[in-house]
Image (cartoon, rainbow, N blue to C red):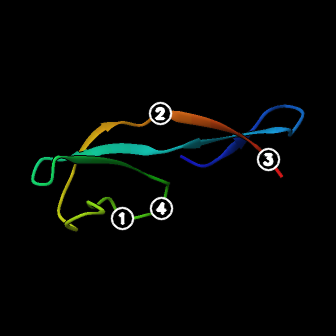
Amino acid sequence: MEAKSDDDGSMEFVVLTAWECASCEVAGRTPPGMALECWSCGGSVVITARPSIRRLAG
């Protein structure tokens, strides 16, 4: 999902993928377009959520 602007263009929404690595017992968030892999071991991860994060555009 791509970033979106509010009607007035002042806010932007980014959907990050939240994940957990069972091997390392760590968690992380990855922005759109990046590989989903553990930052600690580089292994595969389990996706736990895809929350929408609001941030100021600019």
- Say whether residue 10 is left or right of residue 19: right
Are circles 1 and 2 on residues that touch, CB within 8 Å? Answer: no
Q: Which residue is mark 3?
A: 57
Query: Which comes sooner in the sequence, label 2 or label 4?
Result: 4
Q: Earlier in the sequence, mark 2 or mark 3?
A: 2
Disc 2 target residue: 51
| Measured Cα–Cα span from mark 1 to mark 4 | 7 Å
How crowded pointer 3 is (Cα within 10 Å; few <14, some 14-19, many 20+) is rated as few
Q: SS for tag 4?
A: loop
Residue 26: % across, % down: 23, 48
**Considering depth in this image, is 7 or 51 the residue closer to the camera?**
51
The part of the image, by quadrant, that contains residue 24 is bottom left
Query: For residue 43, which quarter of the picture?
Result: bottom left
- Please state the horizontal and vertical placement of residue 7, each as a whole percent of the image: 85, 31
Going from N to C along the chain, the mark reached first, 3 or 4, is: 4
Q: Give the mark, 1 or 2, whose residue is nearer the N terminus.
A: 1
- In this figure, which residue is indicated by the disc labeled 1? 35
The kind of secondary structure element at disc 3 is loop
- Mark 4, residue position: 33
| Distance CA(mark 2)–CA(mark 4) | 15 Å
Front position among marks 2 and 4: 2
Mark 1 element type: loop
